[in-house]
Image (tube, rainbow, N blue to C red):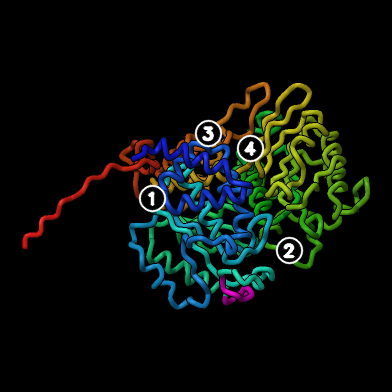
């Protein structure tokens, strides 16, 4: 007989003996498969150390190796060849058994691209974070992989690949299949909260626009990324003393994440009094083709409002090359530079120093994951700017020591927002995810740290996630009630409502039941 604490000591010792981060990830997943309670308790006790192992950045490597390292299935695969049986597959659950679903088609896992059926790993990882950080019951959540094929040649040729060996299906077939899946989910789980995860940039936006009025749904890559970045920016604005409406925003990497961040900043500018177009005029977006301008033959509809005049670059003082980041920085004179490009080292010393020479407190967020794809290292940015830059990153970095001071580096980790958001929605049984519910989550996250310190933080540390998530959940549930979308109102005590929906990794007492056979 052993207590949970005794088991924790052994498990942690075994964890530390693993050779590298991938082996640590495999060890933890094996523990997840054999002892769910011990798994969650272990990571909770060592969350700062283990969160990067079960989530980003190690989760990306684990997904790439998923078929090779396969041990046990977890979650559901809804494969296109089985499209006639979606209802039958979902029939194994009762309506009231599932509160939350993370759905992926794995077309664009940030930093590593199309991973086919291996992408079930990202849905599983997200649900682990929901439990770790917000205490959502792991047995009431479901990871689902929509297997529509893959365009990754390495996977198609891999003899161990577990997915459907076929190129991704075409546009009309794809959308018809997704609609079949969503209709089946809606029919089976009419009160579920559904999170879209790592869909391609065009499909991600399409699905969110198409289904957000049909069910309670949320896209973490668009809305979650935008929300966390916005919370960090709200604190940066307080520190710089410059309101959001006076900022010029340059986003390098105008994909799903980049445009999601732009949308959140734009909304904030409009709230502060700018007209829609005045707010759009403060943005400059760059993608693989350079600066997004109206002269292009074809622009993604979600980028179009941010497109600049095609003649604008002709008046630039230092050359008119809208494909070159340094040239754009020289002429645009941005106060905010955000990287979601996955182009390693794109924020060069010259780019950063040029920006810093034009603004007192440059706001620079190299957000690309994993570490090998970040646009710049925070230690370089702080050194190049003489410590004046306000920095947040996508990957975890240690505090930077510069001229006798330690500068904490905020990590724009989506785990800071989506677990609390999900707990608030599940607790209130919200039928929709409203814009004001997202705003409540953003402002609660921003207020969870103090900016009135010698060297302030833009976002809380990972170790604070449990408390932060609970506070976000309460704020979201309260807003859901105000917005009239909550089915559960908590008898005016929303904090108790949220607390009652949290699951703890503890062993439950049990006793044998003696059944007397009357015969």
Residue at point 85%, 40% (across, down): 349
Which comes sooner in the sequence, label 3 or label 2?
A: 2
Per the model, the C-alpha gap separating discs 2 and 4 is 29 Å
Percent across and percent down for residue 72 are 48, 61
Mark 4 = which residue? Answer: 232
Comparing labels 1 and 2, the label whose residue is closer to the camera: 1
| Location of mark 2 (residue) | 299
Q: Quadrant of residue 288?
A: bottom right
At 55% from the left edge and 55% from the top edge, which residue is drawn? Answer: 219
Q: Label 1 crowding class (10 Å Cα cut-off): few <14, some 14-19, many 20+?
A: many
Q: Nearer the viewer, residue 258 or 97?
A: 97
* Number of marks present in the image shown: 4
Nearer-N-terminus badge (1/2): 2
Mark 4 vs mark 3: give the one in front: 3
Mark found first going from the N terminus, 1 or 3: 1
Q: Are marks 4 and 3 in contact (CB under 8 Å)?
A: no
**Residue 426 x %, y %:** 41, 49
Residue tagged by mark 3?
464
């Amino acid at each position: 007989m052993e207590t949970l604490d005794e088991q924790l000591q052994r498990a942690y010792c075994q964890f530390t003996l693993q050779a590298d981060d991938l082996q640590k990830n495999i060890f933890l997943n094996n523990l997840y498969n054999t002892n769910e309670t011990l798994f969650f308790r272990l990571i909770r006790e060592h969350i700062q150390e283990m969160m990067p192992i079960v989530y980003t950045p190690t989760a990306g490597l684990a997904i790439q190796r998923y078929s090779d390292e396969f041990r046990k299935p977890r979650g559901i695969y809804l494969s296109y060849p089985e499209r006639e049986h979606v209802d039958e597959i979902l029939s194994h659950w009762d309506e009231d058994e599932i509160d939350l679903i993370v759905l992926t088609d794995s077309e664009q896992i940030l930093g590593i691209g199309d991973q086919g059926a291996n992408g079930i790993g990202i849905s599983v990882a997200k649900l682990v974070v929901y439990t770790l950080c917000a205490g959502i019951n792991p047995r009431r959540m479901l990871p689902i992989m929509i297997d529509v094929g893959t365009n990754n040649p390495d996977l198609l040729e891999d003899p161990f690949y577990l997915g459907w060996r076929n190129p991704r299906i075409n546009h009309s077939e794809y959308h018809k299949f997704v609609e079949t899946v969503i209709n089946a989910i809606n029919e089976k789980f009419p009160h579920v909260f559904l999170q879209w995860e790592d869909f391609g940039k065009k499909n991600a936006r399409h699905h969110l626009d198409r289904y957000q009025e049909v069910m309670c749904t949320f896209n973490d890559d668009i809305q979650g990324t935008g929300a966390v970045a916005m919370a960090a920016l709200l604190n940066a604005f307080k520190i710089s003393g410059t309101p959001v409406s006076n900022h010029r925003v340059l986003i390098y990497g105008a994909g799903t994440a980049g445009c999601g961040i732009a949308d959140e900043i734009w909304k904030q500018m409009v709230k502060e009094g700018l007209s829609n177009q005045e707010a759009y005029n403060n943005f400059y977006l760059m993608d693989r083709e350079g600066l997004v301008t109206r002269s292009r033959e074809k622009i993604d509809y979600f980028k179009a409002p941010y497109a600049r005049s095609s003649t604008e670059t002709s008046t630039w003082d230092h050359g008119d090359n809208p494909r070159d980041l340094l040239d754009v920085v020289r002429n645009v004179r941005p106060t905010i530079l955000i990287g979601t490009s996955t182009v390693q080292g794109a924020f060069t010393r010259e780019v950063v120093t040029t920006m810093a020479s034009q603004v007192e407190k440059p706001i620079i967020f190299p957000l690309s994951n994993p570490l090998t794809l970040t646009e710049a290292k925070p230690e370089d940015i702080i050194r190049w700017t003489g410590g004046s830059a306000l920095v947040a990153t996508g990957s975890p970095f240690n505090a930077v020591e510069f001229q006798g001071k330690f500068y904490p580096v905020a990590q724009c980790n989506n785990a800071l927002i989506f677990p609390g958001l999900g707990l608030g929605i599940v607790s209130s049984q919200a039928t929709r995810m409203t814009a004001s519910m997202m705003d409540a989550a953003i402002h609660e996250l921003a207020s969870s740290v103090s900016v009135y310190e010698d060297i302030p933080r833009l976002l809380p540390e990972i170790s604070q996630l449990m408390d932060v998530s609970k506070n976000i959940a309460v704020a979201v549930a309260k807003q859901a009630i105000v917005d009239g979308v909550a089915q559960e109102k908590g008898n005016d005590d929303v904090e108790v409502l949220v607390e009652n929906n949290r699951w703890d990794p503890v062993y439950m007492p049990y006793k044998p039941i003696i059944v007397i056979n009357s015969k």
